[in-house]
Image (cartoon, rainbow, N blue to C red):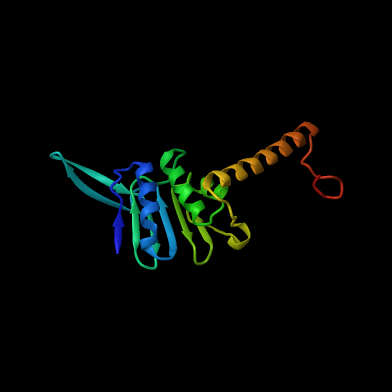
Amino acid sequence: MIIKDEGHGITEKSLEFWQVSKHRLGNILAVVVTAKPLLVEQRKDCGITYDVEYNFTAQGTAGVIYLSGCNCGYGGEGPNGTAKILAELGLPFVAARAAVLSQKVEFDLQTDTLLVDGKKYEFPMSDLRREVSSYDDLLYEIEYERGMEVKREMRNARRGDDGEDDDGEYY
């Protein structure tokens, strides 16, 4: 089964379609997202023919979904939509957000492997998955952790060191 959104490249519509359609795919096996289209279809509306580009695909045990409003390769709304889906599928949001700035992202949920522009990253996903009640809670946790990391970096910069004491331990 192949299903495609009718969002015409609008991220919000693609995310809504994902939420109501993902169950039709069965278990999600892999996601591929590119800056260049994976599939291009011509549509005709009011006598005007135009291309619809699908940059996101997720393969499940029961089918494939194509989304037109989720992509990667820059820091805009489309990649943010992609990062939300990748985080929902278990990739830590920080990794998802960083990955979608690249030209191609491949996430294999069977092997917990992330390929970013061909470079392989493996995550112990069982250790990194979090039980949170909502995407907003996850985002808050990540922003809090990043804020603490930035504070440590700033403190260490003021001290003029790298945060290690003489024994190689971090303080």
Name the residue at 61% across, 57% down. 128
Image vertical order of residue 51 relative to residue 106, above or below: above
Q: How many marks?
A: 0
Name the residue at 30% across, 57% down. 3
- Image quadrant for the C terminus? top right
- Does residue 21 appear in the picture of this structure? yes
User: Residue 38 location, x and y as percent?
Assistant: 33, 53
Which of the two residues, 42 or 90, is positioned nearer the viewer here? 90
- Image quadrant for the N terminus? bottom left
**To which quarter of the image does residue 45 belong?**
top left
User: Residue 138 location, x and y as percent?
Assistant: 57, 47
Name the residue at 21% across, 48% down. 42
User: Residue 10 location, x and y as percent?
Assistant: 34, 41
Question: 84 left or right of 39?
Answer: right
Which of the two residues, 140 or 162, is positioned nearer the viewer here? 140
- Taking the view exactly as shown, the residue that stands out farthest to the front is 133
**To which quarter of the image does residue 145 belong?**
top right
Question: 85 left or right of 1?
Answer: right
Image vertical order of residue 4 relative to residue 98, above or below: below
- Does residue 56 appear in the picture of this structure? no
- Taking the view exactly as shown, the residue that stands out farthest to the left is 47
Name the residue at 24% across, 44% down. 51
User: Residue 28 location, x and y as percent?
Assistant: 43, 63
- Taking the view exactly as shown, the residue that stands out farthest to the top is 158
Which of the two residues, 84 or 98, is positioned nearer the viewer here? 84
